[in-house]
């Protein structure tokens, strides 16, 4: 199975990138999680450009998502909402439709005690509008600075929570694949 993680932060020392990298290591055998972690590659969303000819970076991003059995989003909260680069990336996917019926888990991580839950709520609302299957196991991680040291998730309960999110993604992806398997 293939999972793709979209990292909604451009910061070099991003906790949210660390969460995605640690999640990749916590996947069960047979599941490969790869990161799409440079949202700088995507130009600003422009509907005219999309209608004329979506840029190569957008086509590559869409192809990665289309090929994924499930998607993980790890993102900071900025100014009480979703990060701008993540919103821009999702706008390119609305017309492409690559997240329709796709299992998506949303994780926000923040040094604040709220864990970025407002960004998670907003991201969830946007994804649902796009037709994604947003998993209830999605997670907000408060006080993330106390749980990640030198890029490693050192907090055992967070490691367990990440495993649970990944397991939910696996179960949802399997459910989606079953009708196709039954047909042929
Ligand atoms: C301009 C700005 C706005 C921010 N707004 C919020 C916010 O509304 N809620 C929050 O929990 N953290 C907020 N933060 C703190 C971020 O959560 C923190 O910088 C976090 O580490 C960014 O994620 P990253 O480590 O993955 O880059 C803000 C940070 C900046 C620079």
Image: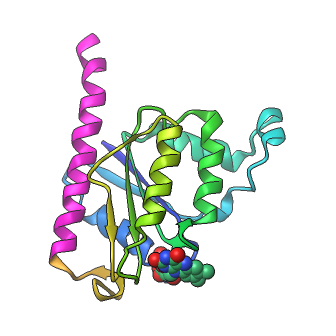
Residue 66 x/y as whole percent:
49, 37
* Residue 110 visible in rendering: yes
Residue 48 x/y as whole percent:
84, 39
Q: Residue furthest top?
A: 183
Residue 79 occupies which quadrant of the picture?
bottom right
Is 120 displayed left or right of 179 in the figure?
A: right
Identify the residue shown where x is 35% and y is 45%.
2
* Residue 14 visible in rendering: no
Region rendered in magenta: 157-184
* Nearest the eye: 124 or 71: 124
From this view, report whether residue 114 is shown above or below residue 62.
below
Q: Is residue 104 magenta?
A: no
Residue 152 occupies which quadrant of the picture?
bottom left
Identify the residue shown where x is 30% and y is 64%.
23
* Nearest the eye: 99 or 120: 120
Identify the residue shown where x is 75% and y is 56%.
44
């Amino acid at each position: 199975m293939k999972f793709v993680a979209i990292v909604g932060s451009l910061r070099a020392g991003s906790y949210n990138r660390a969460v995605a990298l640690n999640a990749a290591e916590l996947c069960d055998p047979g599941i490969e999680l790869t990161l799409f972690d440079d949202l700088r590659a995507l130009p600003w969303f422009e509907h005219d450009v999309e209608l004329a000819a979506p840029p190569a970076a957008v086509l590559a991003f869409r192809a990665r998502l289309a090929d994924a059995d499930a998607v993980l989003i790890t993102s900071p909260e900025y100014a009480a909402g979703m990060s701008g680069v993540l919103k821009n990336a999702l706008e390119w996917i609305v017309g492409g439709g690559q997240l329709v019926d796709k299992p998506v888990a949303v994780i926000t991580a923040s040094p604040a005690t709220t864990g970025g839950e407002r960004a998670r709520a907003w991201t969830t609302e946007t994804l649902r509008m796009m037709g994604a299957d947003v998993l209830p196991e999605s997670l907000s991680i408060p006080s993330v600075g106390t749980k990640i040291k030198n890029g490693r998730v050192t907090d055992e309960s967070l490691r367990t929570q990440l495993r649970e999110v990944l397991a939910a993604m696996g179960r949802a992806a399997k459910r989606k694949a079953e009708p196709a398997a039954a047909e042929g």
